[in-house]
């Protein structure tokens, strides 16, 4: 984390202090992995405010210039307000509810909001290395899990298999609610695993990710359990082509909207345009959905160090659906695909 973006935001708003209190941003600015607390960026310093549950953790994980601890967690925000009395304060726009906004206005002399997603769009070399390691583990988990899926299992049991293989590699959390959608349920883009029984010859879409050292992974693979429906094979090949064409379009100084059009135009050309019903992708990092996006209206120019998912899909009610998703790193001279799980049908 560089303080430069925070300092610039304070200068732009003629503000005095930046206050962070969301878990992803607490980790981003200070390496703190707990769930509650406040970190102030004040005159180039990091100042931590926590309740005593985090006394040891905050000292072990973080390097604060100053740290204040309070026995009762309900005291902490009030003590932050005392520390910032009369100052113009910036908060994270992405982590503030309407009720919090009203509370902040009652406690602080003047407040402003900043979109911190902008800070996190370009990943540091250290962040990229962590995400690469997490994706490699997720690839391995999926490779172990797919051969274990048998007819008669429920979709929820597949999530259990993924979790068992995660725990074996010391991974404790999914990065989002795992999607396992089989048969005609695969036409649900967000078909979170259900009690549906997986039948012989079903198509199965698995969209899952893990949390590794605070960072999210995300991938989707679609497979067949037995003999494949020829129409779904046709759809699969169209989605795979769209996925690979969109990946090939990734490079610096192209917009997410332009990449989205590459995938969308190919699917439309093949006669399935009406069945591609979501954007082509998003970034990820400390949260599963971050900027920049790959969709209509996404005007941000991609730059080296940015990550995007490429996940076109086709979904036909009563038949089924296909989605294939990779994580792509934008590099100086193009792109690098980080997900390595096979995606060509055998």
Image (cartoon, helix red, strand yellow):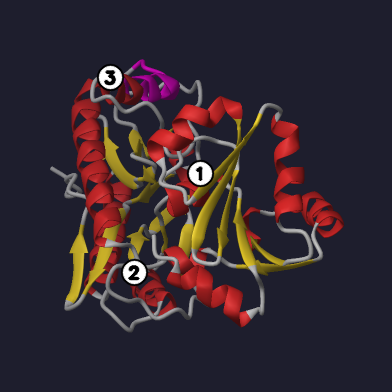
Which residue appears at 37% of the width and 45% of the height? 215
* N-terminal label among 2 and 3: 3
Measuring 29% from the left and 52% from the top, which residue is drawn there?
A: 236
Q: Main secondary structure of the magenta part?
A: helix
Sequence order check: which comes first, mark 1 or mark 3?
3
Element type at mark 2: loop
Extent of the magenta region? 152-161
Quarter of the image for the C terminus: give it: top left
| Residue bearing the label numbered 1 | 190
Q: Nearer the viewer, mark 2 or mark 3?
A: 3
Mark 3, Cα crowd under 10 Å, few <14 / some 14-19 / many 20+, is some
Kindly indicate whether the residue at mark 2 contacts the one at mark 1 (C-beta within 8 angstroms).
no
- Answer left or right for 44 relative to 14: left
Vertical relation: 241 (above or below) 96: below
**Would you say residue 94 sits in the magenta stretch?**
no
The outermost residue toward the top is 152
Which of pointers 1 and 2 lies earlier in the amino acid sequence? 1
Query: Would you name the residue on which mark 2 appears?
Result: 270
Q: Residue furthest bottom?
A: 253
Residue 293 appears in which quarter of the rendering? Answer: bottom left
Q: Nearer the viewer, residue 55 or 145?
A: 55
Judge whether residue 156 is colored magenta: yes
Rounded to the nearest angstrom, the CA distance separating label 2 from label 3 is 33 Å
Report the disc number at residue 150: 3
- SS at badge 1: loop
Quarter residue 31 falls in: top left
Q: Which mark is residue 314?
A: none
Frontmost residue, 294 versus 57? 57
Mark in the foreground, 1 or 3: 1
- Give the CA distance from mark 1 to mark 3: 22 Å
């Amino acid at each position: 984390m560089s303080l430069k973006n925070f300092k610039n935001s304070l200068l732009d708003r003629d503000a005095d202090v930046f206050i962070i209190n969301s878990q992803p941003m607490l980790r981003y600015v200070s390496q703190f992995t707990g769930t509650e607390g406040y970190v102030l960026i004040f005159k180039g310093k990091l100042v931590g405010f926590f309740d005593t549950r985090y006394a040891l953790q905050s000292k072990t994980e973080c390097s604060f210039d100053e740290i204040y601890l309070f026995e009762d967690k309900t005291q902490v925000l009030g003590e932050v307000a005392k520390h910032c009395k009369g100052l113009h304060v910036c908060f994270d726009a992405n982590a503030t509810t309407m009720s919090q906004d009203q509370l902040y206005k009652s406690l602080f002399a003047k407040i402003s909001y900043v979109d911190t997603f902008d800070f996190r769009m370009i990943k540091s070399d250290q962040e990229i290395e962590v995400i690469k390691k997490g994706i490699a583990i997720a690839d391995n988990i999926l490779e172990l899990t797919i051969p274990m899926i048998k007819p008669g299992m429920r979709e929820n049991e597949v999530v259990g298999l993924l979790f068992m293989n995660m725990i074996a590699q010391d991974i404790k959390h999914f990065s989002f609610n795992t999607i396992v959608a089989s048969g005609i349920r695969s036409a649900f883009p967000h078909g979170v695993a259900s009690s549906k029984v997986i039948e012989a010859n079903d198509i199965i879409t698995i969209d899952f990710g893990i949390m590794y050292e605070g960072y999210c992974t995300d991938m989707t693979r679609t497979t067949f359990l037995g003999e494949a429906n020829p129409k779904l094979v046709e759809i699969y090949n169209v989605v795979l082509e769209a996925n690979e064409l969109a990946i090939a379009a990734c490079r610096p100084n192209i917009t997410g909207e332009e990449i989205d059009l590459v995938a969308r135009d190919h699917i439309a050309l093949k006669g399935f345009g009406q069945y591609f019903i979501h954007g082509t992708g998003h970034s990820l990092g400390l949260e599963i959905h971050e900027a920049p996006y790959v969709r209509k209206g996404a005007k941000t120019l991609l730059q080296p160090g940015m990550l995007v998912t490429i996940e076109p899909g086709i979904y036909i009610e009563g038949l089924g659906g296909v989605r294939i998703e990779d994580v792509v790193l934008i590099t100086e001279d193009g792109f690098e695909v980080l997900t390595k799980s096979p995606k060509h049908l055998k």
